[in-house]
Amino acid sequence: MGPFGYIKREKSDKQISAMMREMAYLDHFVKDEVYRDDFIEASRVHIPAMAPQTSPAKSGDVVLWIEGEIYNLDDCAKCLGQACANFEELLISAYKAGKLDQALALVDGYYCAVLYDAKEKHIKLITDRYGMRVLYYYAKGNDFAWAGDVKGLLSLDFVDKTIDETTAPCFLDLGFLLEDHTWFANVKLLEPSTILSLDIETKRISKSNYWRWSDIKQQQVSFYDAVECVSELMVQAVLKRFTPEESIGFPLSGGLDSRLLLAAVHKHHLDYKGHAYTFGREGAEDVLIAQCVAERAGWEHQLYELTGDNWFEPRKDKTWIVDGMLSMMHMHGTEFLPQMAGRIDTMMNGYAGDVVIGGGYTTQDNADKRITAELAVPFYGRHVELANLNNPFYDIPHFEPHIYMNRVRRFTNVGSVNILPYLNIRKPFFDNNLMEFMFSITDQYKYQNRLYAAALLRAVPEFYKDIPWQKTGRMIGNPKDMTKLAKNIRRVKGALSRWGFLGKKTEYTDYNNWLRVPEIAGQLSDLLDPKTAIYRDLVERDLRAEFLKPQLNNKYKNNADRILRAATMEYYLKRALYGGF
């Protein structure tokens, strides 16, 4: 999904139809017109709810494809002294005025773009500031292509499908990839805040950052002022991405992030009744807390129930959608996406709020320090050597930006990639104003959720003062306090467990036991058989004996994540290399 195209070897080349077949893999996708000239063929595939509705945008010799949204168009146009009706006009005008870098640095958005100058014979691939809307490219010799999905690139007859030898070990160990790596040595993920420029005649490729973390200036702010500022910025970030006329869904968990999104909208649009939903097991803590939050707002709440019977089969095909870069274990709720798309067009997502403001990664040892190998090892393990830690892009006295652009972008964000074929997504916690403020002040305020708790209680206290946080089972701000509501949730949870409806732990999933279901265990045993599996060409290990057999032979063993990483790898590569499972 997204923009795609390639540089022709010959004027007569016609491979765009092959790319279109792979990119338009769902019936509801919209296929935009194909653009072709003597040098390129290109197009775009998108869901009906995704702006712009048609592409490309054209102005003279300049042709532009955008996939995604901008949230501060008027501000950008004003700063640049331009009158722009939409995102496409902004970028084309800025390019023609020689101000493309300046414009992109201002944009608060979730997008990728491809700009073609037919007169100059230049192609530019562009990612958003945090690289959330992914764009891949293939470059080998004189061949060059781009696509929003790796699968689109694999359809081209000139693409070399040599496997990246670092990928299998990294994915099996971490469950995600690092930097620009994919499963294929010559297919790369374009970096955040990046413009990749290709001169079609010389085949010269160059890259530049239009924004860097070092652009954020450090400041001294009191804790009280930080609380006040964050409480306003995070609500503004939500409202900037919300209009009552749209069909927007609010996924709720027992955490703090998704609750803030609903609470901010409710506070400023009291008559609005949104659609809140949760996926998980009946009676799980997340579900019970989510129901309380929705009830407090007077919104309907829908449970999409995950069970041992409905989770596994749909996720096989999803390994293809995410290009093999997200374990089947972390595709929670993907089973229900067609149903969700029948109710809503857009999802308001609490993506990474717990780390951006909540300090989920912050310790006394890593606070207020630039990323180093020592600080990166807890996140990347032995694969830290793959991380470009010396990149000037990360020259800021905070270690987290590198983690965001790797673990968060290459793991958490792939969950979004799995959802985007059905729903548009908005991510308020990666709002530019909020992010810039958080990384202009000391990390110490974030430590142990101190700043986040205070800001939430200041902004929307009615949703936090007496509704517990699933992570602790208690209220934020006063961890020793347990209200009647929290006690009732624990009482219901305990009763369900005693009656046999839940296991001892009321998590919203139970993959550890679901993997022991004979039918699923049998499929995984066949899939991971070292005599027939592809993985044996990549790692000299018997993953069935190493991961699956101990799981099935010992009820106390939990290898679920490792097993499903291996299964993801095997399902994906069988399809990528041989066309099927």
Image (cartoon, rainbow, N blue to C red):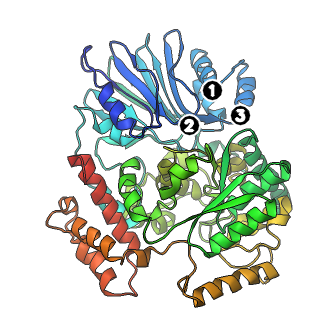
Q: Nearer the viewer, residue 556 or 412?
A: 556
Q: Secondary structure at mark 2?
A: strand
Residue where numbered disc 1 is placed: 87
- Callout 1–callout 2 Cβ contact below 8 Å: yes
**Quadrant where the C terminus lies?**
bottom left
- Residue 220: give its label: none
Among numbered discs 1 and 2, the one appearing first in the sequence: 1
Residue where numbered disc 2 is placed: 111
The residue under label 3 is which amino acid type? Asn
Q: Secondary structure at mark 3?
A: loop
Dot 2, crowdedness within 10 Å: few (<14), some or many (≥20)? many
Q: Residue at x 46, y 26 (%)?
A: 124
Q: Nearer the viewer, residue 513 or 174?
A: 513
Among numbered discs 1 and 3, the one appearing first in the sequence: 3
The residue under label 2 is which amino acid type? Tyr
- Residue 72: give its label: 3
- Which of the 4 image quadrants contains residue 175? bottom left
